[in-house]
Image: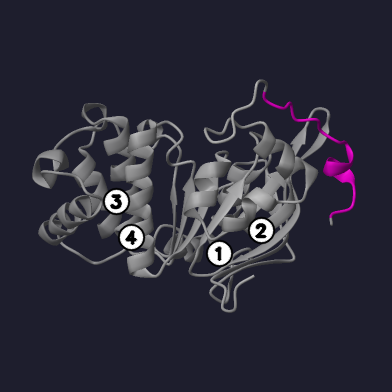
Amino acid sequence: MTATPLLTVDDLWVRFPGRAGLVEAVRGIGFEVGREKLGIVGESGSGKTMTGRAILRLVPRPGRVTARRLEFDGIDLLSIDERSMRRIRGRRISMVMQDPKFSLNPVMSVGKQIAEAYRAHFPAGAREARERALAMLAAVRIRDPRRVYDLHPHEVSGGMGQRVMIAMMLIPEPDLLIADEPTSALDVTVQLKVLAILDDLVTRRGMGLIFISHNLPLVASFCDRVLIMYGGRILETCRAAELHAARHPYTRGLLESLPWIDRPVRELATLERDPAWHDGPLA
């Protein structure tokens, strides 16, 4: 928990009606985020992405989001109207999606898309927006920004596309960035470069970051704190540097099922799930 949180989440639920009944994707979670790097980890379907989308009110219909408290910098995100939410979404809270090829407009150059993101939040002309976009491309360590500015999404690599997405989300200078598995489709060397860019920009700009991932070692080395989710709930919270000493059986099972170069084993452990983790009391 942080002393002066940017975001406060208390008793957050995300529900979807279905033919077999109500599906609860996120179930009564609570946490705070300050100007820090908070990791959210867990298996696919644990509710990580839906948590990020709920904060930005991007849960698709007929999904329903409720919370005792969902507050950003003193603003109740659930009570404000959509017009007010649009002023926050992108401008003060941005979200980097998992795969840039599904998020970028295929018929518009990447530079124009970054410039458009800037003009959506600031009263700027085309020339100023272009210069800002070029500066942002340079900030995410893209060589020859003027050449890349005119490229279309299919003409850039996966790593470059992810940098373009980061540039687009950061150009309005938000206070909080939600990064939804921004490195999952990249190879290891490119992952490290993208993380270094995020770390530098977040630290230099004094932002808050929610880093959603299924890669525990990556989160442990990059974030300040970690939330471990399972079945829509937070089972454990710990300092990232102390993740190796996590106590919950689920977290221990995830860690023990991973290969480690310095601790080779003949056979990796299989995670045995306890039904109590889904519905039982939390520690």
Visible residue check, residue 231: no
Look at label 4 and name its amino acid. Answer: Leu
Visible residue check, residue 255: yes
Which residue was labeled with disc 2?
A: 238
Query: Does label 4 or label 3 sit earlier along the sequence?
Result: 3
The structure residue drawn at horizontal position 36% and vertical position 31%, both measured from the top left corner, is: 101
Q: Where does the N terminus fall, quadrant-wise?
A: bottom right
**Residue density around tag 3, few if under 14, some if 14–19, many if 20 or more, within 10 Å:** many
Q: CA distance from mark 4 to mark 3?
A: 10 Å
Which residue was labeled with disc 1?
A: 81
Q: Which mark is residue 197?
A: none
Q: Position of residue 196 (x, y in %)?
A: 34, 51
Query: Does label 3 or label 1 sit earlier along the sequence?
Result: 1
Foreground tag (4 vs 2): 2
Query: Does label 3 or label 2 sit earlier along the sequence?
Result: 3
Q: CA distance from mark 1 to mark 2?
A: 35 Å
**Residue density around tag 2, few if under 14, some if 14–19, many if 20 or more, within 10 Å:** some
Which residue was labeled with disc 3?
A: 167
Q: Which residues are magenta?
A: 268-282
Foreground tag (3 vs 2): 2
